[in-house]
Image (cartoon, rainbow, N blue to C red):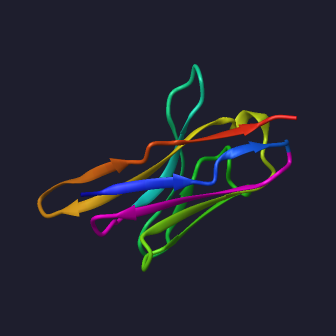
């Protein structure tokens, strides 16, 4: 049974930092990443990382956020610096499990709220 458990969200002032963690279990994961969903907006990709460490970021967070992972622990992290009010959203962990000959299985965490406000 695959589980993704996020932690690290909260309330922070503009310019502050937070670190999100997502502990995954139940399989071996290829791509892992973070998405976010703000009220009135569509869910958007924040950052993804492959098992080799290759990363991709949304333009809106590039140079402020850093995604990393520990394959031995099946854990992905999102270090968020220089946070802005527009970063306020529910952040979701996402992980893919590769399958032979068919699209990968996709799993989601329950989400963690990040609020950037003074």
Residue drawn at (57%, 63%), measured in percent from left and top?
77
Residue plotted at (42% across, 47% down) = 109
**Residue 41 percent location from the top left of the image:** 56, 24
Q: Position of residue 16 (x, y in %)?
A: 83, 51
Is 18 on the left or on the right of 89, as rendered?
A: right
Q: Residue at x 43, y 67 (%)?
A: 50
Residue 15 image point, x, y percent: 86, 48
- So how many labels did they put on this image? 0
Q: Nearer the viewer, residue 6 or 37?
A: 6
Q: Is residue 11 left or right of residue 1?
A: right
Question: Which quarter of the figure has residue 39?
Answer: top right
Task: Answer whether residue 23 is magenta in the image.
Answer: yes
Residue 82, compared with residue 50, is above or below; it is above
110 vs 7, left or right, is left
Q: Residue furthest left?
A: 101
Position of residue 31 relative to residue 118, above or below, is below
Q: Quadrant of residue 88?
A: top right
Is residue 34 highlighted in magenta? Answer: no
The C terminus, quarter of image: top right
Q: Quadrant of the N terminus?
A: bottom left
Q: Residue furthest top?
A: 40
Q: Residue at x 40, y 55 (%)?
A: 4
**Which percent across, then down, holds residue 45?**
51, 44
The residue segment tinted magenta is 15-30
């Amino acid at each position: 049974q695959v589980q993704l458990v996020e932690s690290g969200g909260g309330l922070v002032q503009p310019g502050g930092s937070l670190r999100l963690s997502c502990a995954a279990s139940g399989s071996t994961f290829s791509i892992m990443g973070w998405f976010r969903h703000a009220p009135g907006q569509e869910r958007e990709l924040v950052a993804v990382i492959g098992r080799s460490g290759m990363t991709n970021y949304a333009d809106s967070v590039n140079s402020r956020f850093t995604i990393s992972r520990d394959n031995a622990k099946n854990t992905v992290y999102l270090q968020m610096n220089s946070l802005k009010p527009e970063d306020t959203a529910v952040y979701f962990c996402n992980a893919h499990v590769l399958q032979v000959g068919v699209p990968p299985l996709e799993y989601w965490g329950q989400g963690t709220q990040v609020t950037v406000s003074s």
